[in-house]
């Protein structure tokens, strides 16, 4: 991929157009892509979006003529951008360093408001000034707080749509706060853009092992016959983090752990695990099946959940761990926001009736991991007396792996059975083969117009339907989270709930 040098500063711009002219004096480029990151001054842009764009550029996954433009209210100079992004962009060797320098040099930025036609007309003019091809595709990545989504999308639709080529809008989560606000935002956006122009991102759908679920289930003969209520005792999905809100206390307190990760990342994994085989791997065939699963889930009830909020651990080794959630910046002392949740879901269809799907997630826990466990029923009439259950584990992070817990005879004279793993650790099997980050993968998919790993509007509507009643109860203070210590496994009541729903720790 060739990224053209920056055009933000007029001197460079002149030089660049001369360079381009010299390189290609007679023909106009056929196609160009301009990616505008709105909220380029923010945390997500710095930590995830620009590093993903860099990796896509570095590994030649961007279309040949791609330019990146940042937009936000802050007045940032080119030096500010370089200083901000350089430490975030990984390199491996001198060639990479040179490539990174040219990537950084090429970054463009303009400032403007989020609710003002004048600013977006200026943005449009700027994009036009960067456009040099017959077809200029435009992708807008909205890395902004949800409070400005409506204004920004309206302005983009009114003033910044591509004249030739596609216009696509990538929107971050949270997309709404409950069913009603979701419907309102969705109606607003559907008036402005067609569904196939909107890419609602859920970065867990870009993770290698989450994408692997479909292959594992539908490219193998061996799992499908037992992937149902006759053989599966329960399914558990876990996402634990060993840190607090990392400076995002203001955002987190408004949303809480259910809206932050359960309603989206974990529910998405659940649907991929539970869905029927799609007609094809086409985006709508996959999303049709995911939506059907969600439609079979009743709204979550309080009695099927345990909520928690972390408090400081006086014996904690780090300063962070001695602080509780309400000590975090921008979190009120009397906050009722859960930082931990365990919840049990039932999918009322032929395949899954009676099988509990347990989702556990939380901040400030004892470890950082994300995984899916399908636990099979115990063997009937166990002649060995101690056969533990088979379990298929899909470890999303850290260290991607799939392993199946099986029973074998203990080696030697013993006739006892012992548990072992059929292990597929990705690093052992595929060596140092690069696994792209979720953001890189999804950005590249959006550029290619593949929406299979983006959330469709009806899917999201179902997801909000399932969680809205309990979210309203929590917001109204009707449910109080239990406390748990920073660095612990969460409230002990969550373990009781898990046990009650048939998960057994072998
Ligand atoms: P930030 O709080 O860093 O905001 C991004 C930019 O938006 C800021 O640099 C600022 O730019 C502008 N902004 C901030 N507050 C306001 C406001 N009240 N009104 C108008 N503009 C404002 O957000 P993040 O980058 O953390 O997140 C962006 C989106 O991505 C959010 O929807 C978030 O939920 C989501 N997200 C974030 C993740 C993360 O790790 N940070 C992870 C997953 C999703 P300026 O003042 O220069 O205009
Ligand atoms: C984000 C949440 O969507 O996902 C964060 O807002 C969370 O609170 C993050 O930390 C986790 O993502 P990952 O990829 O690090 O597991």
Image (cartoon, rainbow, N blue to C red):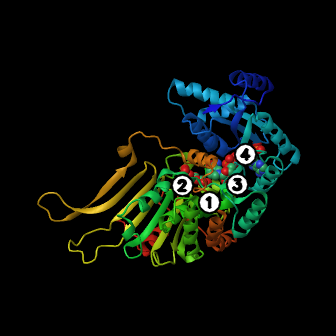
Label 3: state its secondary structure: helix
Q: Residue furthest right?
A: 118
Give the answer, above or below, for where 99 lies relative to 369. Answer: above
Q: Which residue is mark 1?
A: 455
Q: CA distance from mark 4 to mark 3?
A: 12 Å
Q: Secondary structure at mark 4?
A: loop
Q: Which residue is mark 2?
A: 364
Q: Secondary structure at mark 1?
A: loop
Give the mark nearest the N terminus, 2 or 4: 4
| Left/right of residue 288 with respect to residue 165 in the rendered view | left
Q: CA distance from mark 2 to mark 4?
A: 46 Å
What is the number of the mark on residue 486?
none
Of badges 2 and 3, the one in the foreground is 3
Q: Nearer the viewer, residue 177 or 326?
A: 177
x and y, in percent, of residue 261 in the image: 58, 59
Q: Nearer the viewer, residue 330 or 14?
A: 14
CA separation, marks 1 and 4?
A: 23 Å
N-term-proximal mark, 3 vs 1 = 3
Q: Nearer the viewer, mark 4 or mark 3?
A: 4
Q: Is residue 209 left or right of residue 12?
A: left
Q: Which mark is residue 197?
A: 3
Given the current orientation, which residue lies at the most extreme left position?
413
Label 1 to label 2: alpha-carbon separation: 28 Å
Residues at circles 1 and 2 in contact by the CB criterion of under 8 Å: no
The residue at which mark 4 appears reads as 165
């Amino acid at each position: 991929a060739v990224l053209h040098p920056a055009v933000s500063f007029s001197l460079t711009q002149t030089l660049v157009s001369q360079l381009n002219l010299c390189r290609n004096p007679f023909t106009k480029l056929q196609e160009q892509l301009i990616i505008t990151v709105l909220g380029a001054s923010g945390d997500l842009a710095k930590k995830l979006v620009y590093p993903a764009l860099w990796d896509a550029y570095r590994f030649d996954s961007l279309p040949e003529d791609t330019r990146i433009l940042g937009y936000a209210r802050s007045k940032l100079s080119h030096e500010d951008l370089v200083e901000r992004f350089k430490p975030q962009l990984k390199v491996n060797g001198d060639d990479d360093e040179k490539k990174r320098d040219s990537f950084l040099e090429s970054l463009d930025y303009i400032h403007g408001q989020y609710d003002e036609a004048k600013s977006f007309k200026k943005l449009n003019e700027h994009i036009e000034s960067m456009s040099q091809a017959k077809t200029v595709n435009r992708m807008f990545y909205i890395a902004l707080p949800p409070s400005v989504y409506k204004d920004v999308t309206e302005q983009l639709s009114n003033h910044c749509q591509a004249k030739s080529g596609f216009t696509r809008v990538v929107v971050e989560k949270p997309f709404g706060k409950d069913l009603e606000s979701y419907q309102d935002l969705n109606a607003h956006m559907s008036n402005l853009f067609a569904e196939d122009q909107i890419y609602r991102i859920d970065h867990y759908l870009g993770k290698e092992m989450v994408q692997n679920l479909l292959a594992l289930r539908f490219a193998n003969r061996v799992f499908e016959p037992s992937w149902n209520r006759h053989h599966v005792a329960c399914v558990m999905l876990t996402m634990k983090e060993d840190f607090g809100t990392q400076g995002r206390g203001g955002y987190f307190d408004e949303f809480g752990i259910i809206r932050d990760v359960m309603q989206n990342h974990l529910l998405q994994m659940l649907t991929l695990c539970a869905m029927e085989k799609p007609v094809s791997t086409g985006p709508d065939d996959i999303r049709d099946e995911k939506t059907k699963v969600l439609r079979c889930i009743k709204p979550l009830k309080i009695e099927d959940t345990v909520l928690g909020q972390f408090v400081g651990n006086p014996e904690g080794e780090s300063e962070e761990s001695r602080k509780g959630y309400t000590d975090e910046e921008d979190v009120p002392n009397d906050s009722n926001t859960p930082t931990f949740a365990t919840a049990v879901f039932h999918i009322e269809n032929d395949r899954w009736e009676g099988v509990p799907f347990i989702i556990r997630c939380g901040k400030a826990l004892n470890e950082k991991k994300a995984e899916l466990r399908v636990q099979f029923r115990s063997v009937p009439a166990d002649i060995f007396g101690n056969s533990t259950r088979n379990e298929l584990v899909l470890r999303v992070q850290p260290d991607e792996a799939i392993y199946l817990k099986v029973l074998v005879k203990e080696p030697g004279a013993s006739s006892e059975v012992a548990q072992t793993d059929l292990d597929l650790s990705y690093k052992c099997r595929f060596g140092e083969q690069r696994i792209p980050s979720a953001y890189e993968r999804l950005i590249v998919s959006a550029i290619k117009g593949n929406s299979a790993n983006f959330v469709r509007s009806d899917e999201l509507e179902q997801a909000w339907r399932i969680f809205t009643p309990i979210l309203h109860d929590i917001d109204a203070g009707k449910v109080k989270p239990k406390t748990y210590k920073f660095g612990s496994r969460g409230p002990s009541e969550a373990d009781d709930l898990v046990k009650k729903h048939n998960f057994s720790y072998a």
